[in-house]
Amino acid sequence: MLATSDFKKGRKIEIDGAPCEILECSHYKPGKGGAFMRTKYRNLITGAVVEQNFRSGIKFPRPDLEVREMQYLYNEGDGYAFMDMTTYEQISIPTDIVGDKGGYLKEASAYKVMLYEGRPLDLEMSGSVVLEVTMTDPGVKGDTVTGATKPATLETGVVVNVPLFVEIGTRIKVNTETGEYLGRE
């Protein structure tokens, strides 16, 4: 059980039978009456963001969340196929759960999948990934404008802007949250 005094950003709690993640919280003590926590949380099943005040001392159960190491196999169109590394069981994670992260998934690579009662809720990725450039325009000799970029298609099919000197076959590091070029590998 977690009390309101244990609340902090990123903590997972169960509210009304649903797992939730705390986005913001602050302790508030009015001049008159009891103290309470102003809380903003996201329901992990529906994605709804709710702002709610809780009296100090209220306890909440911890949700039955499990994080498993899974291997990405392939894209199914409406979802992504993953295999549990210990049981070899395959599950499909819907496209709406994976979101923009799907463009950075490499086949046969391992990722952490958050499950709630056996259902996938979220896919955890590192902040950056190294991918190979498969298609881009050649750099023009003498074009030395500082900060100039060109589009490049990576091995997963995602397109990112890269500096003019990057060529086909170059392995680059990309930020998975913003899609920005971070450097050559």
Image: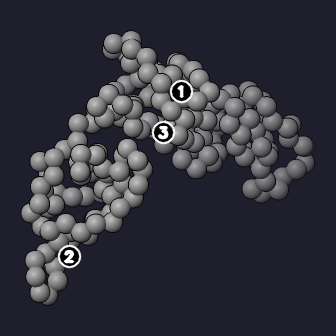
Residue pointed to by mark 2: 28
Residues at discs 3 and 1 in contact (Cβ within 8 Å) = no
Residue pointed to by mark 3: 97
Quarter of the picture containing the C terminus is: top right
Q: How many marks?
A: 3
Q: Quadrant of residue 159?
A: top right
Q: Secondary structure at mark 2?
A: strand
Q: In the displayed structure, does residue 135 sit left or right of residue 119?
A: right
Instruction: Name the kind of residue labelled 1 in the image.
Output: Tyr
Relative height, residue 32 to residue 78 (above, below): below
Q: In the displayed structure, does residue 168 sit left or right of residue 51?
A: right
Q: In the displayed structure, does residue 38 sit left or right of residue 129?
A: left
Residue drawn at point x = 12 percent, y = 55 percent: 59
- Of labels 2 and 3, the one closer to you: 3
Instruction: Name the kind of residue labelled 2 in the image.
Output: Tyr
Question: Which residue occupies the extreme right position in the image?
Answer: 141
Q: In the rendering, at what x and y percent does residue 166 appear?
A: 75, 38
Counting residues from the start of the chain, the first of labels 2 and 3 encountered is 2
Residue pointed to by mark 1: 80
Q: In the rendering, at what x and y percent does residue 168 appear?
A: 77, 30
Marks 2/3: CA–CA distance? 34 Å
Q: In the rendering, at what x and y percent does residue 93 appear?
A: 47, 29
Q: Nearer the viewer, residue 116 or 101?
A: 116
Residue drawn at point x = 86 percent, y = 37 percent: 138
Q: Nearer the viewer, residue 159 or 175?
A: 159
Q: Residues within 10 Å of mark 1 (few under 14, many from 20)?
A: some
